[in-house]
Amino acid sequence: MFDEVKKSIQWGQETLTLETGKVARQADGSVIATLGETSVMANVTFAKEPKPGQDFFPLTVHYQEKYYAAGKIPGGFFKREARPSEKETLTARLIDRPIRPLFVPGFKHEVLVMCTVLSHDLVNDPDIVAMIAASAALTISGVPFMGPIGAARVGFANGEYVLNPEVQDMDHLRSNPEQRLDLVVAGTRDAVMMVESEAYELTEAEMLGAVKFGHEAMQPVIDLIIDLAEAAAKEPFDFQAPDYSALYARVKSLGEAEMRAAYAIRDKGERRDAIEAAKAKVLAGLTEDELADTALGSALKKLESGILRGGIIDGHPRIDGRDTRTVRPIDSEVGFLPRTHGSALFTRGETQALVVTTLGTGDDEQIIDALHGNSRSNFLLHYNFPPYSVGEVGRVGSPGRREIGHGKLAWRALQAVLPAATDFPYTIRVVSEITESNGSSSMASVCGGSLSMMDAGVPLKAPVAGVAMGLILEEDGRWAVLTDILGDEDHLGDMDFKVAGTENGITSLQMDIKVAGITPEIMEQALAQAKDGRMHILGEMAKALTEGRREFSAHAPRIETMTIPTDKIREVIGSGGKVIREIVETSGAKV
C-alpha cells in the first residue's frame, strides 16, 4: 500500500530521520523529519501552469505548531490554534529566506510549502527540523529547485561552538551568562544563504567562526537529503526559463539613457519620479505583444540593476554620491515627546525612526504560551512600517511578517545590553514608528531604541547601533561591499547583511543572500566594514546621549524593592491580607 522510503544519520547528539511515501501522498513532495523525538511534516505543492500575466514568483511558506505535539491544549477561551504566533511567523521567514533564491530564475508558478509540528520533545527546537523537512520535500517534489539546503543552530559556551543546543539552553539567554549565542544558519553545499542570530557582544571573528561551524555541521544533512532524493524523488518538472534577451534589448534601447539619468539623481523622491518616467517612455515604445510579455518586469529590473550595479563595480560613486564605506548623515534627538517615559528621533539620510519607550510593572509582562511551556517577557519591541514612510498609499492592518521580523531583529540587538530584572524591575516596551524609509529601518530602530531607553532612564550596559551592508557580486567575480545601503541597493543587490552591536562586540547578525556564491572573504570584509560603520554611528549617537538618565520621567512609575525577614512576612500581610490592603489604600501604591 505504501512505497515508503526512510533514511537516517547520527547528527550531533541525536538521530535525524527523513521519511516519505506513507503520509500526504497527494502532495508533490512530503517529508517527515525527526530529530530526537521532535517531528515536523513538510508538504510541498506547486501549480503546473503560471497565472496569466503574473510577473513575480508566488512562493508561500507556512509553519504551524500544533499544541498536541507537546501534549497541550491551547490556552484562552478559544481552544483551537488560531492566528500564527510570533514564533510561527519568524520560523516561516527562516524557511522562506534561504529557499526563495534557489528556485530557477523565471519560474513563476505558485508554490506552497506547509510545515506542521507533529511532535515536540521539548529538547530539539522544531524550527531547524522544519527547515530540513521543507528542503527535503522541495528536493523530491520535482519543482525546479536548485537545492537542497541544510540548516543548523549554533551556540557558543565556554569558548566552544555547540551544535543544536537544547531548547532550554536557548531560552532567556540574557539570564544565562554561560551561553552567549543563538545562531541559525542555512545554506547549500557550497554557500551560506541565511543567518539569523542573537549574540552577547561576540567579536567579528567569533561570529564568522560560528557561521563556518554551522555550515560545516549541516553538510551531512545535505548528503542525507540527496540520499533520500535518489530513492524517492519525482521526475523533474519540465520547465525552461523563458528567453527574454530580445525583449531586454528593446527595453534597453528605448530607456537606457533616461534610466541612467534617473539614477544620477540623488534625492529619493525625484529619482523615483524620474525612474517612473523612464519606464513610461519604454512602455510607450513597445508593441502590444511586448507589453503582454510576462518577462517585461524582469527586463525592466535587469536594466535598472545593470545601471546601478555596473557603476559601483567600476568605481563610480553610488546613486546618492557616497563611496562604498560612507554612512549617510545622522541626526539624533532625545526627549522628543513631552509625555512619554522616553523618546528619540533617529534620522539617517532618508530613513527615520521615532522610537518611544514605556516603563511598566510586573503586571505588564507579556505571557508567552509556547509548546515548551509558558514564559514571561519583560522586554517588548514593536515595529510599525506605515505606507506613508515610503510615500505610498496602502492598506493598514495588523502587523505583517516583515514588521514582526524586523521588530524581532531589533529586539535581539537590544536585549543583550538590558540590565538584570533584579537590578531594574520594570517591564520595558519599545515602539518604533518608521516615519521615513530608504534603507534599513530595522537598524534605525536599533539606534533609536537604544537612545529612547537611555532617555527613559534604563541603565543599558552600553549603547547599541546597527548598520545594513550590501553586496554587488558580478558574474566575472568582481565584487563590492556597500556600507549603509539604500532601498534601491537592497532591492537590486545580492546581499542584505545587518549587523548590530556595541563598541565591544556584536549583539545581532542577520544575513540574506540572493546568489549562491558568497565566500568567507566577502563575509569577513562585510563584517569589518560593518564594524567601522557601527563605530561611526555610535559616535554620532553619543552627541545626543551616552548612558541612561539618572532621573525617570515624572510620568513614569516608580518601583522600590524591599526585602523583609521571612519571620515578619505574616505581620506585613496581616490577617486575611488586612495590613497589605491598608498599605495599598493609604499610599495608592501597588504591592
Image (cartoon, rainbow, N blue to C red):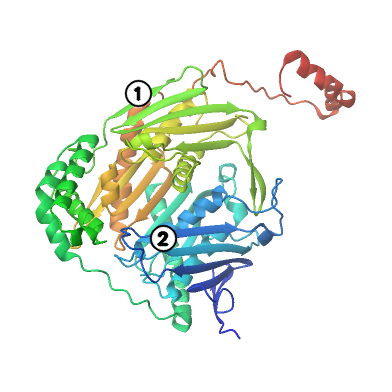
Residue count near mark 2 (Cα–Cα under 10 Å), binned few <14, some 14–19, many ≥20: some
Q: In the rendered image, which residue does mark 1 sit on? A: 543
Instruction: Give coordinates of residue 47: x percent, y percent.
Output: 41, 68
Q: Are marks 1 and 2 in contact (CB under 8 Å)?
A: no
In the rendered image, the vertical position of residue 536 relative to residue 475, given as above or below = above
Give residue 345's quadrant in the image.
top left
| Residue 502 as seen in the image, left or right of residue 176 | left
Q: Is residue 211 above or below residue 176?
A: below
Residue 519, x across and y down, in percent: 30, 60
The type of residue carrying mark 2 is Leu
Q: x and y percent of residue 533 in the render?
A: 30, 39
Give the Cα distance between marks 1 and 2. Answer: 45 Å
Label 1 packing within 10 angstroms: few (<14), some (14-19), many (20+): few
Helix, strand or loop at mark 2: strand
From the viewer's side, name the closer residue of 476 and 503: 476
Quadrant assignment, res 542: top left
Q: Is residue 555 visible?
A: yes
- Mark positioned earlier in the residue sequence (1 or 2): 2
What number of labels is visible? Answer: 2
Q: Let me know if residue 462 appears in the view.
A: no
**Residue at disc 1, secondary structure:** loop
Q: On the rendered structure, is 554 left or right of 57?
A: right
Query: Which of the labelled discs sits on residue 329, or is there none?
Result: none
